[in-house]
Amino acid sequence: MATLPSVSYSITIRLELDGHGSAVGSLTNAVEHVGGVITALDVASAGHERIRIDVTCAARDTDHAQSIVDALGAIEGVTVHKVSDRTFLLHLGGKIEMKSKVPLRNRDELSMAYTPGVARVSQAIAANPDDARRLTIKRNSVAVVTDGSAVLGLGNIGPQAAMPVMEGKAALFKRFADIDAWPIALDTQDVDEIVRTVQLLAPGFGGINLEDISAPRCFEVEERLRDLLDIPVFHDDQHGTAIVVLAALRNALRVVGKDLGEVRIAMSGAGAAGTAILKLLMHAGAKHVVVCDLHGAVHSGRGDLDPNLAWIAENTNPEGYAGDLRGAVDGADVFIGVSAPNVLGGADIAEMNDDSIIFALANPDPEVDPEVAHLHASVVATGRSDYPNQINNVLVFPAVFRGLLDAQSDHVDADMMVAAAKALADVVTADELGPHYIVPSVFQPDLAHQVATAVRDAALREQAQRSERRGGGGRARTAD
């Protein structure tokens, strides 16, 4: 599948060239000739004979970017002075910072913010630990924790290489939900060490966002931390993806007039994301699902089942289908892929039921070419930003934590995630809904508020129900 020029590979080239009228046109022609896209052209300085121009271009990848530079440098009379990679420039020195919320302009303010006044606040928290949520950053803080073992599509690149991604997550938390998130990259991939380290760090946070930890270790890390901690633990690769998929599927089914409980679903991928998607879809009402991995359909007769695959075998594929993915797709209404590129072709999609739905989410190359899928399916979604219906976790994870923090919830469960999915789906109005618009833009003004409110209300309902089960003496917590 051809890759289009992207701002991710945006470069700015400073050139010096003759000042005659046709010189600038030669720059544009050279860039277009090698398949680049000029996004900005600025005159840095000008003289009678020569001018300096900054040309900003989008490229397909680093090699393509170099070919653009070479093409410009080959123009007669043009001198290349400097090439800047705009993505790397954006990351110089990191993308986030800590700022004080209170002024420290004089001795009085210093005495209240720090010693001796701060001692009174510390004593109050020691007497009543629940006050930490009210009197410290705990009420609005999330730890973004990784071991660097499954970073984006890059694999096991380690904790230091994972930091730019974790910083990005923290920036998204702040931008879309006004949450203070802190990147924590652990120099260990041992489950016991990860769990113990996060347990020791937890008192300073109101929630834990696990990120880019490879399967199957991520399942154990999350499960153990949920048992140990009194704050929500959320693995975004699993549950963020699952929430957006459920929301998108609810709207896609509205487009084609089908019901979640009736459709046949074929899935490719039984890792962290695939398992979470499966469990949330089933919790929301899906009944007819076949999951495939590298070895074909997951069924109870297979002899290579780890605990996660064993759960899938016990709870899906009641007919015991034992074939490959192509056979599972034959006659299905929905295909959901979180696996590998190009595992299906147009002929496979053509065998699905009428008004089929394709979610091909592998990045950067989906399980089936979206252009081909559109020839046979009524609704197509991918994980890519250059096609409609992008399934992107940023649509939900900031708002989910906003709702959990506002409810002062001590956990997150499937009902809260379904509430988030329903709220996200409902952001798309009936007038807007269509085959090419089943999920809203992350910049939709009211998106975060609607999702956060739905999660907060679900969490408070759960707290009230728990209080009633314990005897009705307590009340659900409300935000201070």
Image (spheres, rainbow, N blue to C red):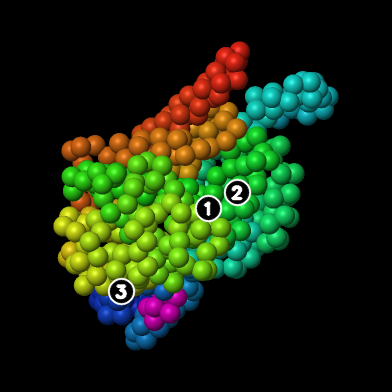
Q: Is residue 335 visible?
A: yes
Residue at image point 60% right, 68% down: 157
Q: Is residue 340 visible?
A: no
Q: Which residue is mark 3?
A: 1
Q: Position of residue 146 (x, y in %)?
A: 62, 55
Please report whichever mark, 2 or 1, sits nearer to the chain's N-terminal start.
1
Q: Residues within 10 Å of mark 2 (few under 14, many from 20)?
A: many
**Horizontal relation, residue 389 to residue 122: left or right:** left
Whole-number angstrom distance, CA of label 3 to CA of label 1: 28 Å
Q: Quadrant of residue 47?
A: bottom left
Whole-number angstrom distance, CA of label 3 to CA of label 2: 36 Å
Q: Secondary structure at mark 3?
A: loop
Q: Which residue is mark 2?
A: 222
Q: Quadrant of the C terminus?
A: top right
Q: Is residue 278 above or below residue 346?
A: above
Q: Which residues are magenta?
A: 62-69
The amino acid type found where label 3 is placed reads: Met
Q: Which residue is mark 1?
A: 168
Q: Position of residue 2 (x, y in %)?
A: 30, 74
Residue at image point 61% right, 47% down: 223
Q: Is the magenta region chiefly helix, strand or loop?
A: helix
Q: Quadrant of the N terminus?
A: bottom left
393 or 292: nearer the viewer? 292
Q: Which mark is nearer the camera, 3 or 1?
A: 3
The amino acid type found where label 2 is placed reads: Glu
**Residue found at the very far right of the displayed protein:** 116
Q: Residues within 10 Å of mark 1 (few under 14, many from 20)?
A: some
Please report whichever mark, 3 or 1, sits nearer to the chain's N-terminal start.
3
The amino acid type found where label 1 is placed reads: Gly
274 or 116: nearer the viewer? 274
Residue 66 is a magenta residue: yes
Q: Secondary structure at mark 2?
A: helix
